[in-house]
Amino acid sequence: MSHHKEPAVIPVITVDGASGTGKGTVSQVLATRLRWNFLDSGALYRVLALAAQKHSVALGNEEALKVLAEHLDVQFIAQENKLSKIILEGEDVTDTIRTELIGNDASIVAALPAVRAALLSRQRVFRELPGLVADGRDMGTVVFPDAELKIFLIASPEERALRRYHQLMEKGINVTLSDLIQELRERDKRDQERTVAPLKPAADAIAIDTNGLTVEEVVNRILAEVHQKKAFPVISSLTTMELVEAAGVAE
Ligand code: DC
């Protein structure tokens, strides 16, 4: 008889979708409720875009960007019920990376195959016990293809632009709704049409249309799926509503 024990698999829930679908808040709240680790993969692409700007690396220079990605000196410092603090080369860039310009640059560097390959292992190290909620575009298709639960969030461009509009207005940033819709369409096109890891649901993903749903409703729907999988305990004593409020971000 063999005494061989199966290696323990660290569970992962992937949450993919376009920006403005509420992905960020939904996955963060989910991670907190489960008391799991959280990966904001978009932040890595944003940090890389910022590093490129800082070191005057052109966004088309794939080789230089690959080297930059491999040596990226970035730290994610976990904070209670909030997004991690992000430190690039010793500097707090948590807010700096959230601008539309950096988001756009991130989408450009994210289209480069060598860059994506260089960032793979950096994303996989987040898979630690007791589990991981991974937020991005290719979490279920490329980075964690063996995840036990894969969610793909959808929302209309108008609804996504409107959410973004309210977020930016709250921060005192003036934009027009029509400009935002236009930018979203362009970014979507680039994210969907790139040849490596395009934005598309994994074959085994559960799609949730978030139009007209609140963050709590989306989280609760995902938790219903989680409950069906007996292996996933839900242990945070805070309610989803309390966590949404604590998160304080609406992306
Ligand atoms: O989710 P976000 O807006 O922070 O992501 C910024 C950009 O990074 C987005 O336009 C596409 C890219 N991205 C990606 O290609 N793959 C991921 N897993 C996450 C983000």
Image (cartoon, rainbow, N blue to C red):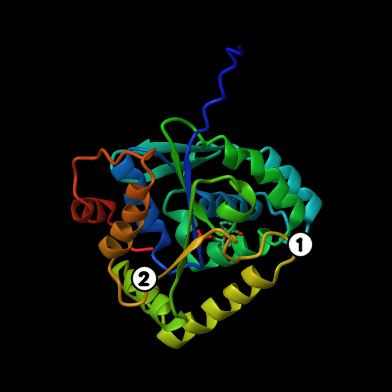
Question: The N terminus appears in which quarter of the rendering?
Answer: top right
Task: Name which residue type carries label 2.
Answer: Leu
Residue 103 located left or right of residue 113: left
Picture coordinates of residue 108, whole percent (x, y): 66, 64
Residue 183, by quadrant, is bottom right
Mark 2 vs 1, N-terminal side: 1
Picture coordinates of residue 230, whole percent (x, y): 36, 41
Determine whether the residue tagged by mark 2 lies in a helix, strand or loop: helix
Task: Name which residue type carries label 1.
Answer: Gly
- Image height of 152 relative to 178, above or below: above
Residue 77 located left or right of residue 192: left
Picture coordinates of residue 132, whole percent (x, y): 45, 41
For ligand 1, the image quadrant comes to: bottom right
Q: Residues within 10 Å of mark 1 (few under 14, many from 20)?
A: few
Q: Residue furthest bottom?
A: 178
Which residue corresponds to the image point at 40% horizontal and 42% vertical from the top-left?
85
Any mark on residue 68, and which?
Answer: none
Determine whether the residue tagged by mark 1 lies in a helix, strand or loop: loop
Which residue corresponds to the image point at 59% horizontal and 39% vertical from the top-left?
124
Q: Is residue 65 visible in the rendered structure shown here?
A: no
Which residue corresponds to the image point at 53% horizontal and 55% vertical from the top-left?
42
Marks 2 & 1, CB-CB < 8 Å contact: no
Cα distance between the residues tagged 2 and 1: 28 Å
Q: Is residue 143 visible in the rendered structure shown here?
A: yes
Nearer to me, 81 or 141: 141
Nearer to me, 227 or 192: 227
- Where does label 1 land, which residue? 60
- Where does label 2 land, which residue? 168
Which residue corresponds to the image point at 62% horizontal and 55% vertical from the top-left?
141
Picture coordinates of residue 18, whole percent (x, y): 51, 68
